[in-house]
Image: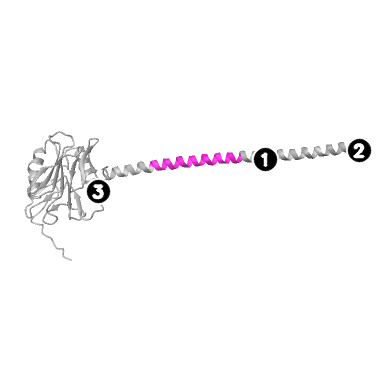
Amino acid sequence: MDRKIGTAPTLVYPESDGEPMAESGKHVRTLLDMIDAIDLYFREVPDVHVGGNMFLYYEEGNPRKVISPDVFMVRGVSKKDLRTYKTWEQQPYLDFVLELASPSTYAKDFNEKKTIYEQILQVKEYCIYDPYGEIDPSFIGFRLVGDTYQEIAFIEGRLPFKTLGLELGERDGVLRLYDPVTETWLGPSREHVDEAKARASEAETYAREAENRASEAENRASEAENRASEAENRASEEARARRDAEAELEKLRAALERLETTQ
């Protein structure tokens, strides 16, 4: 059977440039935690795609028109895995982008990328965060108002993002999501697993302690029952002794009467 030889595509949109996904371990952890936490928050909401660290092409036919958001969220796109994001195949406008900055990426994040997100991709909200606080500002957010980004004001040390319905802030020096409705911090799934394990361990300890308390109560009840049985036996013996004494007394009285009669 003859095998058909396929021709290679004339236009290629690479999936990677072979560079590391982030500059440091803290950048990597923050990137992965943010993707996971946002995805976890929207897990029950259909057609909300959360991704990051992938090539996003924004001009069909021109692979050089590419950008790679660290973290992004977009509505109107399925949750299926994407190897690259092409704006002419998916939703052309993103809702939220987070870039993890450093001294070496500072200029690009605040100039080239900011211009692309603002003017071409029209990202509704854009956040720049430096996990090490080495740049100034190290934490800033922008919201698209008309065709221009305006800086988002902090609320109690956190940045509110309307597209997420959440706030971003530092908790113990780590970037985390905050739900203003429930007034709770939201972590990645691994933290939820750790919390569930801790609660399970606490529940197991409580159950074991309750079992021990029940066993002690049962022992005390058994001891009380034994004491009651012993008291009942003593009472029975005393009653029997009293009856025997009364019977003996009656015999003595009868004998005394007989003696008195014979005299």
**Amino acid marked by disc 1:** Asn
Q: Earlier in the sequence, mark 2 or mark 1?
A: 1
Give the magenta range.
201-226
The quadrant the N terminus occupies is bottom left
Badge 1 marks a residue whose secondary structure is: helix
User: Where residue 19 sits: x, y (%)?
Assistant: 14, 43
Residue 207 magenta-drawn?
yes
* Structural distance between the alpha carbons of marks 3 and 2: 109 Å
Up the image or down, 177 lies above or below 4; here it is above
Q: Are marks 3 and 2 in contact (CB under 8 Å)?
A: no
Tell me the element at label 3: helix
Which corner quadrant of the image does residue 238 belong to? top right
Kindly identify which numbered label has been placed on residue 261.
2
Q: Nearer the viewer, residue 234 or 113?
A: 234
Tell me the distance, in whole angstroms, between the alpha carbons under discs 2 and 1.
Answer: 42 Å
Q: Is residue 91 magenta?
A: no
Taking the spot 74% from the left edge, 38% from the top edge, the residue there is 242
- The main secondary structure of the magenta stretch is helix
Q: Residue at x 67, y 40 (%)?
A: 233
Residue under pointer 1: 233
Residue drawn where x is 61% and y is 40% of the image: 226
Which of the two marks, 3 or 2, is nearer to us in this view?
Answer: 2
Q: Quadrant of residue 111?
A: top left
Picture coordinates of residue 252, whole percent (x, y):
83, 37
Q: Nearer the viewer, residue 142 or 78?
A: 142
Q: Earlier in the sequence, mark 3 or mark 2?
A: 3
| N-term-proximal mark, 3 vs 1 | 3
**Distance between the Cα atoms at labels 3 and 1?**
69 Å
